[in-house]
Amino acid sequence: MTTRYSRRQFLSRVGIGTAAVAGSTGLFGGYTAEALQSLTERARHEANRADRFGRIFDRLTPFAEPSPRLMAALLDIGKPGGILDAGDNLAAGPVALFEDASLSPNNPDNPTHTAGTTFMGQFMDHDMTFDLTSRLGVPTVPERSENTRTPAFDLDSVYGGGPFRSPNLYEHGDRAKFRVEFGGEFEDLPRDATMRAIIPDPRNDEQVLISGFQAAFLKFHNNAVDLIRSQTRGRRTERGSDEIRRTFGEANELTRWHYQWMILHEFLPLFVGREMVRDVLQRGRRFYEPRRGEAFIPVEFQGAAYRFGHSMVRPSYRANEELTGFIFDPRSEGMADPDDLRGGARAPRRYVGFEVFFDFGDGRVKRNKRIDAKISTPLFRLPLGAIATGDPPTSLPQRNLLRQVTWSLPSGQSIARAIGAAALDRDDLRELEPYRLGLDRSTPLWYYVLKEAEVMEQGLHLGPVGGRIVAEVIIGLLQTDPDSFLNAQRHWRPVLPQRNGATGDFRMVDFVTFAGVDPTSRGE
């Protein structure tokens, strides 16, 4: 039987920040053997980490039976230069690829998303799910596999066990606030002598962009602490640990609720479309049902539908005016200040210029790629150091396709029938017919979700199968968390100021402004 705790119980019982430090490189992994061993042991021994994965569609059969032919086909579909490869012109270099769309003719931009949507989606993923035990291509029972994050948008990947259980995350002289360091031009995560970030989840220093988001959350919380203290001056206040507990708790709630508001009102509609969000909120969830009233992460979400974000990744990014690079570049291996965007390093230019990732109205924002069956070319050759196990395959699409076998996931077509949605035609999937395995009729769920978005929604957001799974799980996590604003204060609205000074709504540009990492705060 799985033991579960509320967020408050979690913060009072756990100390995950005291030894968790970031690994090294990569967008999707990259940990030392020692870090992996430490995380695995925690998953085994800490009751709050004992959550298991599960299924939504537990009566549907797998999309195919495992066989050498199937494995060979999946590896071929996801190989470099294969049918999923966007064929970006990497030889042109990261700056040219960032600026010239003609160098990525098969990889069009999404006019409705800004580039930061990808990394907010990744940040959310790291807040609710982390699978350290399943093996690629080896059928695994989800209920026996541990999710080493709490299945809630509670920011445990930021707060760890709180200031008394994870003191090394917090300022020594003021434990209500996070440690934030400066070794470059702007803020950075706290780091040890080896440049590993001192944060609860090592994935949030996989690359410069996600570490910039983590740092923004640290600064947002710290500014919330300052605001709360400024509003309580003149009252009788507690001393010492009592004041820290009260101030920390209020700042934590402010941060979490504004974050949850953005998830529900800004980012989820970008992922699945506003109509899908409205349908789930008004008519209720039809398929995702928490076990015994307790949230869990379904493998249809974790292993397939929520991996739609991999299709949104650009081949290169301008982190700021001084640093434009590929997510990974083998030539940067071993450099103190890499030319790519890997994490685990500190230098003046290694920070996030949020004006490139969210629209501040100054014309500098860049767009995501569309959600479709084309993946940016750099993701087909990950360095081994960017893979948690250090084992091949190094193609991210190959790894995603093998995960469909790991979880024995149903086909996209069978889920479409189960939810009463229109399914893709075989003609839409004709590129899979030559494998002679019926994959055009019974398609791996991850591939189907991407193709569905491309065919039915022009790649702007997910289609009926992918959108239904993602919307129901994300809304379900908010609805089942007793400490979310939807439960604690259902009619709550944001109280912190927007950029225009108003209140009642809150978007990511407002978040980074309150955090003090926006262009104006930096004098740009």
Image: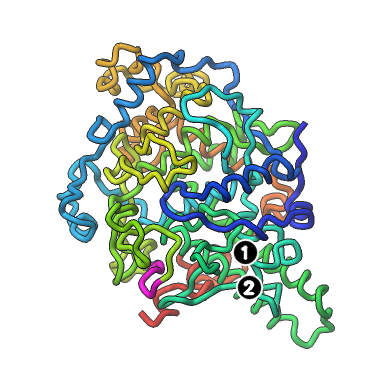
Report if residue 510 lies within the magenta region: no
**Mark 1 element type:** helix
Between the C-alphas of marks 2 and 1, the distance is 7 Å
Query: Which residue is nearer to you in this view: 330 or 440?
Result: 330
**How many residues crowd mark 1 within 10 Å: few (<14), some (14–19), many (20+)?**
many
Question: Which residue in the protein does label 1 denote?
Answer: 255
Where residue 453 sits in the image (x, y, percent)?
36, 35
- Label 1 is placed on what type of residue? Thr
For this view, does 472 lie left or right of residue 337? right
The residue where tag 2 is placed is 224
Residue at (36%, 72%) from the top-left corner? 349
Q: Nearer the viewer, residue 521 or 34?
A: 34
Among the 4 quarters of the image, the one containing residue 66: top left
Relative image position of residue 473 (x, y in whole percent)? 58, 38
The quarter of the image holding the C terminus is: bottom left
Query: Residue at position x 50%, y 33% from top?
Result: 303
Q: Amino acid at mark 2?
A: Ala
Magenta part, dominant SS = loop
- Element under disc 2: helix
Q: Locate residue 412, reporting x and y percent.
A: 43, 23
State which region is magenta.
347-354
Above or below, 306 relative to 385: above
> Residue most toward the bottom?
234
Q: In this image, 95 relative to 522: left or right?
A: left
Which percent across, then down, holds residue 145? Answer: 63, 32
State yes or no: discs 2 and 1 in contact (Cβ < 8 Å). yes
